[in-house]
Image (cartoon, rainbow, N blue to C red):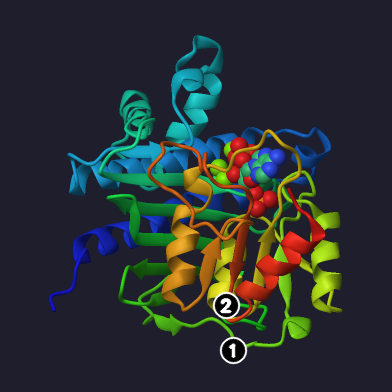
């Protein structure tokens, strides 16, 4: 069989790698003064800059493909935001010297798709903004959805160790094409990728689970109850962003629980599409808390899903059962 989506895979990998350079440049410049002043502007500059770079590459390679991205340039175009726009343009120019303010805004706005299409890209230019500001984990997540199925994914995790357990070097990109498995590439350099595979853990009590760092994003108390019910004694690993999907995909964790915190929150497509394909291609399973597959054919939100459960596959049924028994709604 011919390999499918070869060009899409190549472009997605190159695009998230380039955006990661911009994000790293900006994160490296965050000093204690930024944190003291609770200044969110570094992540705002990185959000816009990352989206501009990735949408530019997609526009070049696939001019007809729409992009459903998290950010739009409306705020950036306001005269009061001129200084912020200057900072975004300066960061983009370090990678694309010919970039102008107008071009940067136009690239960002290529990400303005808000309705479902039979073929579209979805992008979170920085996922885990709180982690980014803390100097912690964040991700750049890009996926191609065709007929409601994620076909190609690229997930850059600039602060995740390249090798599980080792502290350095950091920076890894996970990619997947449906039916072809999942790969982990060094973020930088020409190094060969390695195949990633979920764990073989079959005893729920032995499960290593991860969840959001932020308790506002995922109910830590409910997850603790589910864990108790499964006989899990290890404390959860807490980290920001879709890096949690990567942890399960490469067998560093067996479970990622994202349990709803309040009735109103609906998950966004760009917060999950890339992670879902990477985990499933690594042999794992992803559903919502009721065991339903995540629906990417409904627009920007996972309107028909509630929470997210990610596992190595073997543990999935037991976890869904425990969630039902605990009564997570
Ligand atoms: N109440 C909430 N429940 C679940 N996810 C949320 C909630 N509020 C924001 N998010 C989203 O969670 C993602 C980060 O999750 P994590 O905790 O796994 O790092 C962000 O994309 C964030 O969206 P946003 O970018 O709009 O803030
Ligand atoms: Mg996000
Ligand atoms: Mg984001
Ligand atoms: Mg956001």
Residue at image location 83% in from the left, 38% down from the top: 36
Q: Earlier in the sequence, mark 1 or mark 2?
A: 1
Residue 224 seen in this snapshot: yes
In whole angstroms, how far apart are the C-alphas of marks 1 and 2?
7 Å
Examine the rendered structure and indicate whether residue 26 appears above or below residue 152: above
Q: Nearer the viewer, residue 111 or 84?
A: 111
Examine the rendered structure and indicate whether residue 78 appears above or below residue 320: above
Residue 159 seen in this snapshot: no
> Which of the 4 quarters of the picture holds residue 129?
top right
Say left or right for 268 vs 290.
Answer: left
Q: Are marks 1 and 2 in contact (CB under 8 Å)?
A: yes
The label on residue 200 is 1
Question: Dot 1 surroundings within 10 Å: few (below 14), some, or many (20 or more)?
Answer: few
Image spot of residue 42 (x, y percent): 62, 38
- Badge 2 marks a residue whose secondary structure is loop
Image spot of residue 157 (x, y percent): 54, 62
Residue at image location 65% in from the left, 59% down from the top: 137
The label on residue 312 is 2
Say left or right for 234 vs 302.
Answer: right
Of all residues shown, which one is farthest toward the left? 2
Q: Nearer the viewer, residue 218 or 165?
A: 218
Q: Quadrant of the N terminus?
A: bottom left
Residue at image location 54% in from the left, 79% down from the top: 250
Image spot of residue 275 (x, y percent): 49, 61
Say left or right for 308 vs 294.
Answer: right
Examine the rendered structure and indicate whether residue 55 appears above or below residue 3: above
Say left or right for 187 vs 176.
Answer: right
In which quadrant of this rendering is ligand 2 seen? top right
Residue at image location 48% in from the left, 35% down from the top: 48
- Badge 1 marks a residue whose secondary structure is loop
The label on residue 126 is none
């Amino acid at each position: 069989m011919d390999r499918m989506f070869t060009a899409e895979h190549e472009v997605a990998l190159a695009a998230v790698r380039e955006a990661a350079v911009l994000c790293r440049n900006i994160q490296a410049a965050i000093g204690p003064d930024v944190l003291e002043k609770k200044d969110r502007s570094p992540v705002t500059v990185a959000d816009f800059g990352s989206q501009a770079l990735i949408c530019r590459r997609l526009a070049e390679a696939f001019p007809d493909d729409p992009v459903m991205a998290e950010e739009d340039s409306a705020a950036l175009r306001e005269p009061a935001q001129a200084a912020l726009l200057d900072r975004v343009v300066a960061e983009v120019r370090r990678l694309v010297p010919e970039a102008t303010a107008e071009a940067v805004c136009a690239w960002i706005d290529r990400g303005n798709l808000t309705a479902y299409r039979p073929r579209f890209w979805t992008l979170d230019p920085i996922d885990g903004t709180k982690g980014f500001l803390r100097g912690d984990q964040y991700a750049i997540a890009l996926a191609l959805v065709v007929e409601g199925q994620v076909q190609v994914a690229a997930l850059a995790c600039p602060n995740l160790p390249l090798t599980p357990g080792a502290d350095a070097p950091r920076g890894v990109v996970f990619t997947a094409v449906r039916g072809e498995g999942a790969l982990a590439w060094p973020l930088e350099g020409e190094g060969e990728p390695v195949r990633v595979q979920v764990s073989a853990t079959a005893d729920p009590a032995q499960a290593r689970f991860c969840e959001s760092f932020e308790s506002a994003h995922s109910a830590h108390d409910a997850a603790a109850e589910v864990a108790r019910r499964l006989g899990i004694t290890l404390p959860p690993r807490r980290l920001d962003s879709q890096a949690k999907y990567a942890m399960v995909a490469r067998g560093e964790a067996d479970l990622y629980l994202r349990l709803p915190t309040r009735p109103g929150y609906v998950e966004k497509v760009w917060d999950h599409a890339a992670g879902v394909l990477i985990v499933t291609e690594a042999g794992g399973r992803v559903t919502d808390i009721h065991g339903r597959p995540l629906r990417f054919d409904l627009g920007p939100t996972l309107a028909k899903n509630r929470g997210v459960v990610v596992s190595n596959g073997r543990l999935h049924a037991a976890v869904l059962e425990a969630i039902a028994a605990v009564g997570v709604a």
